[in-house]
Image: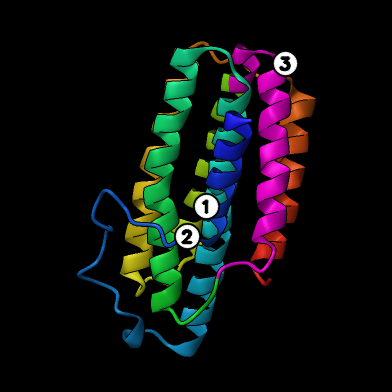
Amino acid sequence: MEKVLETADAALRTLFAEHRAARPMPGTDAGLASELSAADKKLSAAYMRVNHVGEICAQALYTGQAAITRNRTLRLQLESAAREETDHLAWTRQRLDALGSRPSLLNPLWYAGAFALGLVAGKISDRVSLGFVAETEDQVSEHLAGHLRDLPRRDTASRAVVAQMKIDEEEHAAEARRAGGVDLPSPVKALMRGAAKIMTTTAHYI
């Protein structure tokens, strides 16, 4: 029962609490929203909404995996990664606010789906769970690279946030592999890409 309550508390805090970053937000001295055109603000907000959804999903994934594993060392690693992802959650929300936009209306749905995936991956084995983290972070890093390519050049604040997020996600992937994460089968990777495509396309607008 204690674990259930802790998991429920984590979900509520992720979805509804105001998040505070442990690290300063990158690019706080540049790229003021007022300097951007309406079209650039709209485009940047769409990308930051997608990134915010990604961080909601990361919290859910790590929470699900940490809840199911019996490996204390792995649980601590997952909880540590989740805390670092909280910085990303706070930064992307701050950028959305600065751009005069909002998070995805479907965040509870995204959270539930990612949490379920975390439970399934963790239930199979710790090495598969770590492999799932590594592959997820690899795909997120690819998405962030695309965002850096497509974000308005004048929005240096959003670009700085995305650049730091990319560095952090690559480190999480490396940590998962060092801890014993296995390489997932190609069909599983393809399914993950398909699910991510649906999520990112939807969150771009809703």
Q: In this rendering, which labeled residue sits more in front, label 2 or label 3?
A: 2
Residue 132 visible from this viewpoint: no
Callout 2: 10 Å neighbours few (<14), some, many (20+)?
few
Q: Is residue 169 magenta?
A: no
**Residue 180: x %, y % from top left:** 52, 10
**Residue 168: x %, y % from top left:** 38, 39
Residue receiving disc 2: 17
Residue receiving disc 3: 124
Residue receiving disc 1: 14
Q: Name the foreground residue: 204 vs 149.
A: 204
Query: Could you give the CA–CA distance between mark 1 and mark 3, rounded to whole angstroms?
Result: 25 Å
The relative height of residue 168 versus residue 44 in the rendered view (above or below) is: above
Q: Is tag 2's residue or tag 3's residue first in the polypeptide sequence?
A: 2
What's the residue at 55%, 27% (across, down)?
Answer: 66
What's the residue at 50%, 42% (across, down)?
Answer: 141
Q: Is tag 1's residue or tag 3's residue first in the polypeptide sequence?
A: 1
Magenta segment: 103-129
